[in-house]
Image (cartoon, rainbow, N blue to C red):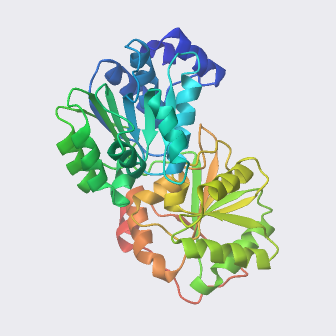
Amino acid sequence: MSFAKLGLSDSILKALTDSDYQKPTEIQQKAIPLILKGEDIIASAQTGTGKTASFVLPMLELLNNGDAVRGRSIRALILVPTRELAKQVDTSIQRYGKNLNLSSLAIYGGTDIDADKEKLAKGIDILVATPGRLLDMAYQRNLFFNDLEFLVLDEADKMLDMGFIDDLNKIIDRLPSDRQSMLFSATLDGKVRYLADTVYSDAVEVKVSPKGKTPNIEQWMIAVDKDTKSALLSHLIKENDWDQALIFVEKKHSAAKLVEQLAKRGITADSIHAGRSQAQRERVWNDFKTGKLQFLVATGVAARGLDMQNLSRVINYDLPYPAEEYIHRIGRTGRAGQKGEAISLVSKDDFKNLCMIESLLNHLLERREIEEFPIRKAVPISILNYHKR
């Protein structure tokens, strides 16, 4: 199927062609026609499936055929969990809508709020926002929702994990009921299901690609003692002459510590985490994306929304919890049909998380040994997953 068969206008199709997008992904094929028909949707879609375009493209199409925006009003609202994702979504809007007379803006904490107020005063067609900054603007009466036509909750699972449920409820209570709503999440279980049931009525549910399915990514693990992890990582980088890697840790203090440990072994790295300013995070990410920086250490939350098409590999220095976060992490590599590599450094303390990840994947991670790093505390093999195999 081509994008032309999904009901998009020539102006949008030209922008897609200019971006070298030729064939819609599974989520795009399923979601775009439903949104163009005016349906509310609840979609289960993982990182790297093309979900941003699946709601941005039909919204641009519908907004382009509607009325012009009025001062301090918005026509579409996209809520996201992190500033990085807000910027990424806004960049996609501008790319896909470059041939349309529509305006967009991303607002999030850590930026000049007065500059945002000035832009909002002129009226914005599509606003991408983190919940906290949006409420700040609403409380100060710097934007209004009277003309709102569309609401998107993007990465709803992460917004709930980050404790945004009260903010989301406050925002939704302010919105007109006569709107088209869309929710995208890696999982529709638990809190996300409850949110979906309270926000959406008669929504069409869309599911793509069984969770854990990552055909373009070679996944493997190394069992390692906790106190030799940084030495092993340094060994892998040097012995394999890795060109680049995104390295995930669980806590921000772990990120800074690992950068220091790598530096002592002659490896230059930098970090992105919640303790760094927006300007610092942008500088580090741009250095990494352009190849100026080879190794980036990041916490999972900070890395949400960081999009890079040609990332060779992802390293799980710490295994994540919950298990679904593993899919988000490794989805940073192997994008757009390219091959990627995901390597996990697993100590005995990680066994519980490993079991949950392998249950999600429905297969064991391949185990490889590094002769120079014999393990003292063995990591067991999950009996449950062993029998599944």
Q: Is residue 163 left or right of residue 95?
A: left
Residue 204 % position (x, y): 24, 31
Q: Is residue 69 left or right of residue 231?
A: left
Confirm whether residue 48 shows in the render: no
Determine whether 1 is above or below 237 in the image. above
Residue 183 % position (x, y): 32, 39
What residue is rendered at 40% in x and 75% in y? 352
Determine whether 115 is above or below 158 in the image. above
Of the pair 191 and 22, the residue shown nearer to us: 191
Residue 146 % position (x, y): 28, 28
Of the pair 6 and 162, the residue shown nearer to us: 162
Residue 202 % position (x, y): 17, 31
What residue is rendered at 51% in x and 49% in y? 83
What residue is rendered at 45% in x and 13% in y? 5
Q: Is residue 373 left or right of residue 100?
A: right
Q: Quadrant of the C terminus?
A: bottom left
Q: Is residue 164 left or right of residue 201?
A: right
What residue is rendered at 24% in x and 39% in y? 174
Of the pair 284 and 70, the residue shown nearer to us: 70
Q: Find the residue positioned furthest to the bottom.
A: 376
